[in-house]
Amino acid sequence: FWLSCLEHFKKELNAQQFNTWIKPLQLETSPNNHTEAVLIAPNRFVMQWVKDNFLSRIETMAQAHFSNDIRFQLRLADQIEIRKKAIIQDDATPVIKISRPSKKKNPDYPNQLNPNFNFDNFVAGKANQLARAGAIQVAESPGIAYNPLFIYGGVGLGKTHLIQSVGNFVLENNQQAKVRYVHAEKYVSDVVNAYQHKSFDKFKLYYHSLDLLLVDDVQFFGGKNRTQEEFFYAFNALIEAHKQVIITCDSYPKEISGLEERLVSRFGWGLTVAVEPPELEMRVAILLKRASMEKIRLDENVAFFIAKHIRSNVRELEGALKRVLAYSRFVGHEISLDLSKEALKDLLAVQNRQISIENIQKTVADYYKIKVSEMYSKKRARIVARPRQMAMAIAKELTPLSLPDIGEAFGGRDHTTILHGYRKINELRASDPAINRDFNALLHILRG
Ligand code: ADP
Ligand code: MG
């Protein structure tokens, strides 16, 4: 029965989802004709996810298979449970504690962490749900939950914030932990340095003895072979010693150009999760959080106004808020809707100019190397139909135009066609990392 279950999910899910959620499950008691069965999950994160997303389907399949009502229980794997207990003690309800910069640092290991990045001031939402959950899990039991944790996504979406939160959290719980945050570019220059000074032994001694290594923006390793070789050794040494490695990147491991295959495959050993651009409500929440942190009074309608117009990423959102704040100080008035409109006038004008539907069509056509005229044509070959749908989805995302208006711009198509294209792309973005990457890259280009 379980084998057929696995087969089923293998077909239904993409490889990444299957490997993350279903493959690690073990059937402890086989259902037979009993009415109860137990599935063992490797960690709490997988357990919860399976419970919420797959359990009822597994039960339905079991019911069909045995013609009997069978209830499934999920349990955590024992040895992991024990190891985890040793580390976090309070095992029942691990609560995220406020991480504050620790005073007593381990002087031999400058961790390079920014103490302002913590889980408490990281706003949770659908866009970062998985990445945040994975990061919390890893922070609670470094070296055990997932190794490595690989977080990817566009700029300004909170990757650095998230991994530094893990570092600060780990240090908060254990001030002796050897934690190191390193931007990939800095790591490259460390390698160059070691090369020049023939000091690879020292370099190795340092990087191979860490408890937690955070490598940010690993796409910078692309094409740097010596760096990749060194990192390969460090990575292996750490993983073998059950030390935690966390990596961020602007793209999915397979899509990092100029990265050795052996690193690509290793990056996928643990958990690979994406961060997405935040939705409107989440952008509002981020603005309100930021305002309260800085003790600025910000009305919700003003936050909505800013969030509605600044859609690309969190960094730009924060930039817009700073601009509004600076303007309010400059003219000596409280922040209001009118004042915000005035303060952001230039910024918004630039955005609006750039993101016309013609611009979207041209940019998407160039990106996929097809003719702009294919945007209006009736051809249905996938090679042109998919980019066309991509342009429709982006037009829906980036412009305030209605579906019929967009349809008009795409050679007089019906609004249902536009809606279908929009939904199709969103569906594909969830299942096909390449499409998701194209989408994000195009947004990035269009927003300048
Ligand atoms: P990335 O590393 O993905 O380019 P950063 O982590 O540097 O992005 O985030 C950019 C800015 O946005 C930082 O100031 C960060 O604190 C803030 N930020 C990003 N995501 C969130 C979030 N979910 N909640 C609060 N602040 C966020
Ligand atoms: Mg970053």
Image (spheres, helix red, strand yellow):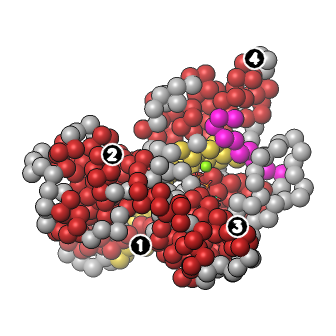
**Can you tell which of label 2 and label 1 is closer to the viewer?**
2
Query: Could you tell me which secondary element the residue under label 3 belongs to?
Result: helix
Q: Earlier in the sequence, mark 4 or mark 2?
A: 4
Residue of label 2: 363
Q: Earlier in the sequence, mark 3 or mark 4?
A: 4
Which quadrant would residue 74 be assigned to in this image?
bottom left
Contact (Cβ within 8 Å) of mark 3 with mark 2: no
Q: Earlier in the sequence, mark 4 or mark 1?
A: 1
Residue 67 appears left or right of 366: left
Question: Which residues are drawn in magenta?
Answer: 176-186
Three-letter residue code for mark 4: Gln
Residue of label 4: 196
Residue of label 1: 52
Three-letter residue code for mark 3: Ala
Identify the residue at image location x=74%, y=44%.
Answer: 180
Residue 139 appears left or right of 373: right
CA neighbours of label 3 inside 10 A, class few (<14), some (14 to 19), many (20+): some
Q: Is residue 180 magenta?
A: yes
Query: Could you tell me which secondary element the residue under label 4 belongs to?
Result: helix
Identify the residue at image location x=75%, y=65%.
Answer: 99
Q: How many marks?
A: 4
Q: Label 4 vs label 1: CA separation?
A: 53 Å
Which quadrant would residue 331 be assigned to in this image?
bottom right
Q: Earlier in the sequence, mark 1 or mark 3?
A: 1
Contact (Cβ within 8 Å) of mark 1 with mark 3: no
